[in-house]
Image (tube, coloured by chain):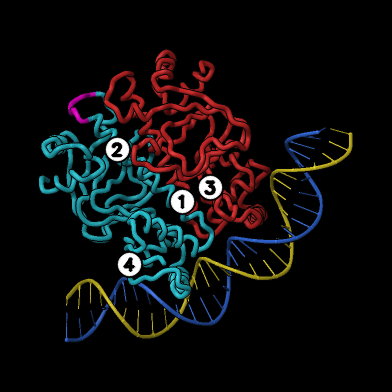
Chain colours: A red, B cyan, C yellow, D blue
DNA sequence: TCTTTTCTGTTGTAAAAACAACCGATTTGT
DNA sequence: ACAAATCGGTTGTTTTTACAACAGAAAAGA
């Protein structure tokens, strides 16, 4: 567990917390880690969550497959990001999505719930953790709103422009890479892959952008 | 301000807080109220927010108009609900949407930011407020995920079924009313109004549901 | 290295949505 | 009570998307 401390130190959850303090919090929060092979499910829709999770290795997708097999990708979790904050509340109900490892991954589970819902002061970092959690969930909230912004566009082209512009802005450059392949991007934007591929190539031919694999350049 | 205490008492933010305590918190949190006529903007996209707001009268929409005038409704705020929690974090950036009064409305502004970002104990309800805020934003987060669930459906019919099913479940009955008229529902689901109206009537003719104005019944 | 699988782009067709225009009914405002 | 604006439904046309099927390139695996 110790080897993950450098990673944890750079996460939202442990912002402003020193190495020694993280160590003591690991036991205070009953931290456990678990590894998953590519393709394995970390969490499943319908489960009730009592922990939050931090990804310390690999890459996860939050997704949803419907009865007819069509997939929708809600979001992507990269190293240092967490998942499950929204399900800590006692009345939050069951998980609405699956969380799947898209690479071999390692996740740390924290029982943050008891920190939030009890008034005990077994650990003196309560306030800090709560505040960090709050900021983390705020950030996720804003991300969801951004995604809704993309999805509310009517055409595939508009959705692409909306998404790619956001990525360019986020990475502070007209050159950037995206964390999805074509099928995943289509699932993320809820459009058909072939139609999207087609549109992307049209946009390239019109001189709006260039791309090669996951690297894009807006012109 | 005092007349709003009964309303405030039933909000997420003040869950578990007594009347006297609310009164003292109103000054602690520098509460101010403001009224808006139907159609007026409460908040505008691009603004930087330092307060959170609680609606005590009326109805608000969180929405977004693009350059070509097409509108997208992100969500609806009814009495007792709050807005702006996601923008309390110091690095949250500008507001991504407009907030508009769809009826004559009254809003109370709270400077919750200083509660979160300082360690002073000027008010002994810090912990409670932070926890309530956390649960509120968790809930909003889950709502956004649900909305994304509707929007990720490919056809208008699927979007409608997804949305109406959620409403039925939420209101615990196959009979329920929705908080939107047709145009607003279309803007909420990001589809064309006339196409949606058409689809709705087809579904009615096929015996899937009945409706009259904002009242629906799933069969 | 060779085979197999995955990934991406391309095309044609069928289905669906967007758009525009219109009308009657209801609601709002004066 | 009357005029004006809003609302909901209907229809036809155009545009866009979904779907299916295929092929070459790249990547993964044996």
State the residue in front, B217 or B22: B217
- Place of residue C15 in the rendered image (x, y in percent of width and height, measured from the top left): 60, 69
Q: Is residue A63 magenta?
A: no
> Against A151, is B194 above or below?
below
In this figure, which residue is indicated by the disc labeled 4?
A: B215
Please report contact status of discs 4 and 1: CB closer than 8 Å, yes or no: no
Count neighbours of disc 2 (C-alpha within 10 A) and say few if under 14, some if 14 to 19, many if 20 or more.
many
N-terminal of the pair, mark 4 or mark 1, is 1
In this figure, which residue is indicated by the disc labeled 2?
A: B133
Please state the extent of the stretch shown in magenta in the rendering.
Answer: B120-125
- Place of residue B25 in the rendered image (x, y in percent of width and height, measured from the top left): 16, 35
State the residue in front, B219 or B84: B219
Residue A172 seen: no
In this figure, which residue is indicated by the disc labeled 1?
A: B148
Measure how far apart labels 1 and 3 are at the Cα level.
11 Å
Element type at marker 4?
strand
Please report, as a chain letter, where disc 1 is located: B
Please report, as a chain letter, where disc 2 is located: B
In this figure, which residue is indicated by the disc labeled 3?
A: A64
Element type at marker 3?
strand
> Against A51, is B203 above or below?
below
Work out whether disc 4 and disc 3 sit on a shared chain: no
Please report, as a chain letter, where disc 4 is located: B
Q: Quadrant of residue A191?
A: bottom right
């Amino acid at each position: 567990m110790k080897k993950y401390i450098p990673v944890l130190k750079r996460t939202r959850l442990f912002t402003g917390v020193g190495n020694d303090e993280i160590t003591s919090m690991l036991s205070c929060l009953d931290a456990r880690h678990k590894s998953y092979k590519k393709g394995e499910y970390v969490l499943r829709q319908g489960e009730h969550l009592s922990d939050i999770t931090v990804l310390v290795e690999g890459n996860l997708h939050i997704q949803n497959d419907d009865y007819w097999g069509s997939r929708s990708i809600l979001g992507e979790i990269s190293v240092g990001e967490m998942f499950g904050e929204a399900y800590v509340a006692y009345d939050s109900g069951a998980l609405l999505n699956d969380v799947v490892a898209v690479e071999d991954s390692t996740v740390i589970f924290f029982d943050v719930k008891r920190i939030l819902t009890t008034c005990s002061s077994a650990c003196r970092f309560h306030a800090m953790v709560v505040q960090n959690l709050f900021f983390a969930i705020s950030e996720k909230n804003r991300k969801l709103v951004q995604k809704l912004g993309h999805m509310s566009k009517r055409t595939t082209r508009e959705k692409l422009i909306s998404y790619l512009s956001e990525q360019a802005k986020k990475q502070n450059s007209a050159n950037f890479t995206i964390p999805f392949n074509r099928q995943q991007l289509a699932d993320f934007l809820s459009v058909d892959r072939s139609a999207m591929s087609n549109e992307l190539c049209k946009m390239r031919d019109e001189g709006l952008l260039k791309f090669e694999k996951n690297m894009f350049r807006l012109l």
